[in-house]
Amino acid sequence: MALAITPSLPTARYRRLLSLLLLAFAVAFILTTYTRTGTPNILSHIWHTRPPQAPADGPMAVYHVESARPPLEGMPRTLAALDRNFIPVPGSNRRLVIVGDVHGMIEPLNALLDKIGYRREQSQDEDGGDHLVFVGDMINKGPSSGAVVDLAMKLGASAVRGNHEDRILLERAAMSLVRAGDDLPDPHEDQHVLSSPSRRGNPSDRACARSLTDTQASWLAARPALLDLGFLPGCFPGSGRVVVAHAGLVPGIGPLEAQDPWAVMNMRSVTYPREELRREEAIDALVDIAAARFRTSDEYLSKKDHWTDRAIRKKLRPDIPEADIDAEFRRRTKPSDRDIAVPSDGHGGVPWTDAWEEAQLAIEQESRRTAVVYGHDSKVGLRDRPYSLGLDSGCVKGKKLSALVVEATDDGVRRRIVSVPCRKPKAAGGDVFGEGGDEDRQ
C-alpha cells in the first residue's frame, strides 16, 4: 500500500522542503493511511530529516498535523457512487455523458449536448435516457459559471468537485467572514480561511464567487471529490471499475476513501522520495570510487593538504556520466521504493497517469483494476489510455470541449469521444463560441 504525502505549500517552498527530505534521515513512523475532508494547500505533513549517509531503506518519518486549510461545509464525503440505474447496459437505451472542464463556457456546453443529441427531457429517467456527469471545474475563468451550474441542476447531473469549485467556495467563505460585521476574526478558524494559500483572493475569483447564488454554491459544495461508476461495460476493457476524479488518483492507495481530496483535485504528477534518495546514494557511491582513484593521482599527491574531502567531491561530481548514474540507480532500485508517493500540482515529477497505468498493469486480477476519467490538465489535453482518460481539451483557452459518451445498443455497449470547438472568452462579456476544428473519436 502506498502512502501519499500531500504537498501543502506553494510550489517553490514545497520543492525546497522535498529537497531537505531527500537529504535527511527520517526518525519516526510511516503514516499508513489518512483521509481529510478539507483540501490542503498549506503544510499538513512535516518531514524530519536524515543524515546524508543513511540508506534509502531506512525509516521515513511523516508527522501528520491538522491541515491549515479549513474544510468547507457541504461536502458530504470524499466518495460517492453513481446510481446503477444510470449505467448503460445492453438493451437499456441509456447513455452516460461525461463532460470535461467547462469553466463557465455555457454556449460550447449547449452545443456539445446538442451535437450528442442529449435527451434533456429524459435526463433523470432511470428506466432509459441520458445522464450527465461533469469532471469538475464547471465554473470560473469563463463568463457564465452560474448558467452552467443551473443547467447541471436542471438536468439532475452528477459532478465531482474540481480545484476551481474548491477555490471559489473558499473565496465565498472568506467573503462571508469579511461581510459578517465588526467582529474580530476567530484566530483558530477565520484566519485559516482568510490567509489560506488555497484561496487566491484575486479579482476574477471574487467576481465568480459573487456571481453564484446561495443555491448554486450549496449544490457545488455538496459534490464529492470522487464519483465511483462501478463496472462500466464496454468502456475500459480489462478494468473492473471506473472512477471520475477531477485531477487523478494516487497509485497504491487501497480503498478509494483513503485518497486525499487535495491530490484528487490538484495533482498532475507524483514523485517518489525513496527513489530520489536511491539516486543520491548511487551518485555518492560513484563519486567514492572516483575519489579513491583521485587520491592516487599526482594532482592530489602534489597538494595533499589542499584537498579536503568536500573539495574532491565537488571536483569529481560533474565528471560522473549520467549513463553510469542511471545504471547504478537501476541496480539499487527496489520495488518498495514506490511505496511512498508524493502528489504534486506541477509537471516536474512522473505524470500521474504513467504511474497509474503501471500500477494497474501490476494488478494480476483484471476485475481489481480501476480506470480513471479525469480533467484538470489542459496541457496534456484529450488523452485516451487503457486505464485513464483525460477530457480537459482546453475549452476556455479557445480549443475544444469534449465528452465521453457511453451508450447502450441492442447488442452491447459502445463508447465514443465527441468534441466541439470553443472560442476564448473576451475579458468582459461578448460572444465566446465560434468556428473552429471539430472532432469525433471512437
Image (tube, rainbow, N blue to C red):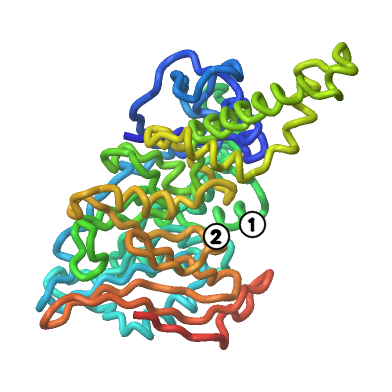
Q: CA distance from mark 1 to mark 2?
A: 8 Å
How many labels, in total? 2
Whether residue 36 can be seen here = no
Earlier-in-chain disc, 1 versus 2: 2
Q: Is residue 348 above or below residue 439?
A: above
Q: Residue 235's x, y, as percent?
A: 25, 68
Q: Secondary structure at mark 1?
A: helix
Residue linked to disc 2: 140
Location of the C terminus (image quadrant)? bottom left
Q: Residue 405's x, y, as percent?
A: 31, 74
Front residue of 376/349: it is 349
Q: In the figure, residue 233 lies in which quadrant?
A: bottom left
Front residue of 307/347: it is 307
Q: Residue 285's x, y, as percent?
A: 60, 27
Q: Is residue 88 above or below residue 300?
A: below
Front residue of 305/57: it is 305
Residue 133 is left or right of residue 62, and the answer is: left
The label number, if any, that marks residue 391 in the structure image: none
Q: In the figure, residue 412 lies in which quadrant?
A: bottom left
Residue 364 is left or right of residue 187, and the answer is: left
| View extreme (top): residue | 305
Q: Is residue 404 above or below residue 441?
A: above
Check contact, mark 1 vs mark 2: CB within 8 A: yes
Residue linked to disc 1: 204
Location of the N terminus (image quadrant)? top left
Residue 429 is left or right of residue 96, and the answer is: right
Q: Residues within 10 Å of mark 1 (few under 14, many from 20)?
A: some
Q: Secondary structure at mark 2?
A: loop
Q: Tell me the kind of residue under disc 1.
A: Ser
Q: Tell me the kind of residue under disc 2.
A: Asn
| View extreme (bottom): residue | 435
